[in-house]
Image (cartoon, rainbow, N blue to C red):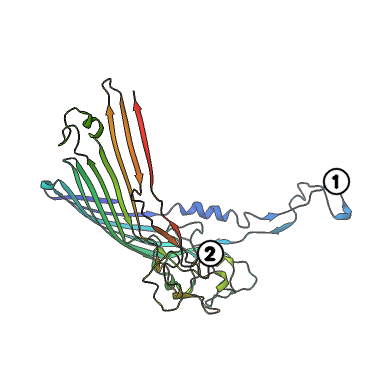
Amino acid sequence: RLGLAYRITNGMVMRLGYGITYNGSAYAGIAGLMSNQPPFSIAEKWTYAPVADLANSLLPITLRNGFATPIGASNTYGIDPNYRLGYAQQWDFSVQQEVRPLKLQVLMDYTGTKGTHLDLVETPNLAPTGALRIANVQDFRWETFGADSILHSGLVRVNRRLTNGISFGVTYQFSKSIDDASTLSGGGGGGIPIQNLFNRRADRGLSTIDQPHRLNVQYNYELPFGTNKHFFSEPSLYKAALGDWQLNGTWVYNSGTPLTVSAPSSCYTNLTGVTNGTLRANATGLSTGISDKSVAEWFNTSAFTCPAAGQYGNAGKDTLRNPGVISMAATLNKTFVFADGRSLNVRIQANNPLNMVQYNRFNTTLNSPTFGRVTNTAQMRTAQIVARFNF
């Protein structure tokens, strides 16, 4: 990685950077799967006989006949002999400005990331129509390369140093990521196979990691009671109870990640299990949005149906999105100092202190009994009090 920093004026700094990273960890996943394929691994069985029983064709186990009856092999994974490691190029440009009268530090940043030669996981025994090319042949996944991705991200960050008992940091990021990859990490067949290796463009869409909006707020506030504060600065019972408390916490909002409406095996009776989770539903042309979202129906389920026999679904990849999630955490703490030097630290911590109900997942499998319904919620409020006595 290369980087360059240049001070334009007093208080303003410009930074440039470029780096390239190869996915060397892919080999570990590939080796693990290849070790379970023939000729490296073959499943066999034998019947043990303590003494010879020629009438039933049973013999004692010896080194010569101990593994003589192969019963098949798990040949479900293969890799392109010309496989190449994927790599990512990242470039970055930022400008940082210090606003001294307001004691603020402002950063504006742009980052681009391009993935090249990313992993593709294919099912070679499927014809363009979705039917098996060779009947009665075991399905397998074929790992190759050739996919790509692109991510653009803009970020604004404002930090304020502790002044008058208040400090905070606010970061907003807007980004978009697109790919046609089975998996962005690569290696070991971990990605979902592309639906149709004869039509790669149909698998190009939002990345599963895409989150357009991210907002993070961090704050620290020294309550105006106690030593050198506006109220209760002199020794008193009020200062002992209410003085020198600090409140800090975070407030985070993240857009939901994309989701794909998948078609179950009941929609593709001519296909087998290796493609489960890969095949998409058909789009009917209706809008997926509804005006009265509810737990029972979060999107318009009529917008999707099973594809016609012998055809792939034409619904795009990652056309739906999980709901955005807000997470909050707050901590109130104080240290009570005693005359003999001992102290007691009291901390009150809470997650989701407003106890907001937030839906963060819904079912996107066509024909499922819960298709379109909310299936999970974010964590509800939790709180705890922690006390530590130091002596």
| In the image, farthest residue toward the front | 237
Q: Nearer the viewer, residue 154 or 248?
A: 248
Q: Which of 253 and 229 is in front in this view?
A: 229
In the picture, measured across the screen, residue 28 lies left or right of residue 21, that is right
Q: Residues within 10 Å of mark 2 (few under 14, many from 20)?
A: some
Identified at 68% across, 55% down, the residue is: 43
Q: Tag 2: residue type?
A: Trp
In the picture, measured across the screen, residue 184 lies left or right of residue 100, that is right
Query: For residue 322, which numbered disc appears in the image?
Result: none
Quarter of the image where the C terminus is located: top left
Residue under label 2: 142
> Residue 103's quadrant in the figure?
top left
Q: Which of 233 and 98 is in front in this view?
A: 233
Q: Does residue 152 appear in this view?
A: no
Seen in the picture, residue 6 relative to 384 is either above or below; the reply is: below
Identified at 34% across, 60% down, the residue is: 255
Identified at 83% across, 50% down, the residue is: 59
Residue under label 1: 51
Seen in the picture, residue 137 relative to 232 is either above or below; the reply is: below
In the picture, measured across the screen, residue 327 lies left or right of residue 47, that is left
Q: Tag 1: residue type?
A: Val
